[in-house]
Amino acid sequence: MGPASTTLAKTLRLLLEERNLTIEDVAVATEIKRATIGDWLAGTSPRNMQDARTVARYLGVTFHYLCFGHSEDDVSAIINSAPTEMILDGIFRLRLEKIKSGSNDEEK
């Protein structure tokens, strides 16, 4: 269970409580299995991102909000308001590593 799945579980639980909904309510409305939603609440990461998008849409939030507990605008506002000197001061090393081949990659 990673940080993102923990955040999704907390956000989903909060949204269900705020809207006075049950797992059953969401499952029936979205046609997603109760067990799947229950797994997310237990901290399991969604295997099917389309299911997570469907639940987010049903709950009236963005996919990003459901998964991370804040809107993309919040992140942009924080980045844009940060002093540039603090962000760009120092020496940085970035590493980009391919961890999974895409479906369009050819076997070599």
Image: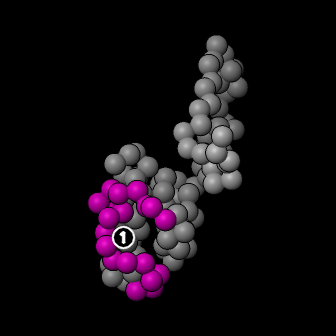
Bounds of the magenta span? 28-48
Q: Quadrant of residue 57?
A: bottom right
Badge 1 density bin: few <14, some 14–19, many ≥20, Cα 10 Å = some
Residue at 43%, 61% in the rendered image: 46
Front position in the image: 66 or 73? 66
Q: Identify the secondary structure beneath mark 1.
A: helix
Front position in the image: 100 or 33? 100
Look at the image and say whether residue 27 sits in the magenta stretch.
no
Q: Give the image location of residue 6, x and y in percent.
A: 36, 51
Quadrant, the C terminus: top right
Q: Is residue 15 above or below residue 80?
A: below
Name the amino acid, label 1. Thr
Give the farthest residue toward the top: 90
Q: Is residue 90 above or below residue 98?
A: above
Give the colouring mode of the picture: one colour
Q: Give the image location of residue 76, x and y in percent.
A: 66, 45
Q: Give the image location of residue 9, x and y in percent.
A: 36, 59
Left or right: 67 in relation to 77: left
Residue at 40%, 56% in the rendered image: 45
- The residue tagged 1 is 36
Q: Give the image location of residue 71, x and y in percent.
A: 57, 55
Look at the image and say whether residue 46 sits in the magenta stretch.
yes
